[in-house]
Amino acid sequence: MSYERILVPTDMSDFANQAIRYASLLHDRLGSRITLLYADETYFPVDVLEVPLGYYLEQAPETKAKLQEKLREHANEHLPHAQVETIVVQDAPARAIVHTAREMKADLVIMGTHGRRGWRRALLGSVTETLLHEIDRPVITVTPGILTVDATADIKHIVCPVNFTYIARESLQHASALAEAFGAELIVVYVAEGIEPPQLPEVEAAFGLWVAPAVRGRVSYRLAVVRDGNPAEGVIGVAQDVDADLIVIGAQHKFFSDATVIGTTTQRITRFARCPVMTVVRRAKAEIDVDVPEEELIHA
């Protein structure tokens, strides 16, 4: 896995700065190139304009230039040792992020989150919610309070929840690559719902054989089988027990659609985990020839 090009959407807020700090961590370790994107959709309500609409439209290039200057200053302040590209786009943020990520062939998107609309988005945020449904590449979400200004961020423990599916194997490959790059311990979690204790040794043996090809002896890892309780709570519980610095989980695009299926388990993990979460999206067209029961898909 390669993370040569990282896109970091920002509104230059403290929430967004957490994502910049995480991107800086990957830049320092992997030499990734970082692009900061500022996107906003500006509307001019005719009924409240104090001067003719033409005046505002004429000022648009100047306004954009000022934003570009401000974004460049922001990049110099928060990423002083990195070579950073800055882009200002006048568009709805989620749409701009998806389009820019595709245009620049970004390997990864990292964004800070903050919720403003309703309890279901309390820790995720409406832009991130929309983005995860539309993006076709990995996204790391960094929630408020995870990284403090003075803290030295690092990745020492990575948790990767999986089942026996192709998207799970892809997310495991990402987790393994990052664990190798940072010398981190990899904890692979299997949520064994409905499995009775006598069946556990057989499940663990099959699980170990399934994990091995994705890891390929590159990193140290251990298996964790969660039997009881809600799957999301089980994964978050493991992450808290090992003081995880990152959770990596898969997301499945619907067949014959550009939308991503956001399942309950990954929704909860992304919203309530106390560490950053990488959501790995797999295009459905790559799995059309694979006969995988729908209920076995990892939904993110």
Image (cartoon, rainbow, N blue to C red):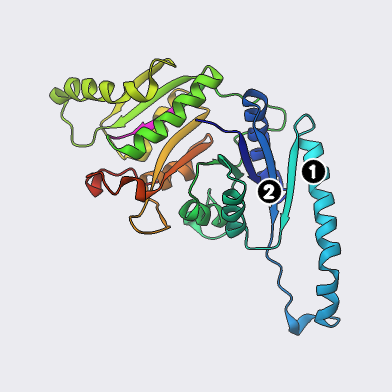
Image coordinates of residue 79 in percent, x first then y, are 76, 34
Q: Which residue does the numbered mark 1 point to in the structure image?
A: 74
Q: Does residue 160 show up magenta in the picture?
A: yes
Residue type marked 1: His
Residue 169: percent from the left, percent from the top?
35, 33
Q: Nearer the viewer, residue 5 or 203?
A: 5
Residue visible at 40% across and 23% down in the picture: 187
Q: Residue at x 55, y 57 (%)?
A: 126
- Report the side of 90 relative to 300 (left or right): right
Q: Is residue 46 above or below residue 94?
A: below
1 and 2 marks in contact (CB < 8 Å): yes
Q: What amino acid type is highlighted by mark number 2?
A: Thr
Residue 142 appears in the figure: no
Magenta residues (range) = 159-163
Residue closest to the eye, 21 or 177: 177
Q: Which residue is mark 2?
A: 10
Q: Secondary structure at mark 1?
A: helix
Residue 163: % across, % down:
29, 35
Task: Tell me: residue 166, above or below residue 86.
Answer: above
Residue 241 part of the magenta segment: no
Q: Secondary structure at mark 2?
A: loop
Q: Residue at x 67, y 25 (%)?
A: 28
Q: Pick out the residue farthest to the left.
A: 198
Q: Earlier in the sequence, mark 1 or mark 2?
A: 2
Closer to us: 260 or 244: 260
Q: Nearer the viewer, residue 244 or 104?
A: 104
